[in-house]
Amino acid sequence: MNPDTSKSSMTVNSLMQWGVAISILFPIILFALLAFISLNADHNAFLYVDTAFAFLALIVVFGVNQWVQRRVRERLASLADVCRDFSSGDRAVRAVVDPRARTQHRFAPSGSDRKNHHGSESSRPAVGTEC
């Protein structure tokens, strides 16, 4: 039986990276626009544009942070549900997995790397293999 695939196909890491990127880049773009506008606008118009850009940056950064937090909470809640179902005896339950996020982790040895930290061959089967 294949595990379920992720509905959004975004990992928690990519969600947080997008959140940081938008939270940094959007105010920088607004500052660049503000610098350009300051060359051509009078004092009163510049003050209004400056205030509008400040509120816009605040709203966008706050909204992006709320979006990232909500998505991460959803992922953690679904993982907690899977753990709860598994501990109650449902062995067929599977966690949502992004099929594109198949990276080698530092603590998950692959099938060819079965040596323990002493350099000898491990007696345990590799991660993901059946006994």
Image (cartoon, grey):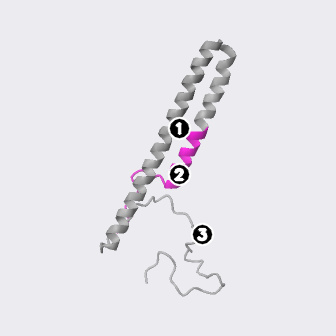
Question: Between marks 1 and 2, how big is the CA–CA gap?
Answer: 17 Å
The disc label shown at residue 106, or none: 3
Q: Position of residue 85 (x, y in %)?
A: 32, 68
Q: Residues within 10 Å of mark 2 (few under 14, many from 20)?
A: few
**Amino acid type indicated by mark 1:** Val
User: Magenta region: which residues?
Assistant: 1-24
Q: Which residue is mark 2?
A: 14
Using the rendered view, name the quadrant where residue 75 is placed: bottom left
In the picture, measured across the screen, residue 61 lies left or right of residue 28, that is left
Q: Which mark is residue 61?
A: 1
**Secondary structure found at label 3:** loop
- Amino acid type of disc 3? Arg
Q: Are marks 1 and 2 in contact (CB under 8 Å)?
A: no
At a point 43% along the width and 80% down the height, the residue shown is 130
| Residue 55 placement (x, y as % from top left) | 53, 28
Identity of the residue drawn at 58% across and 77% down: 112
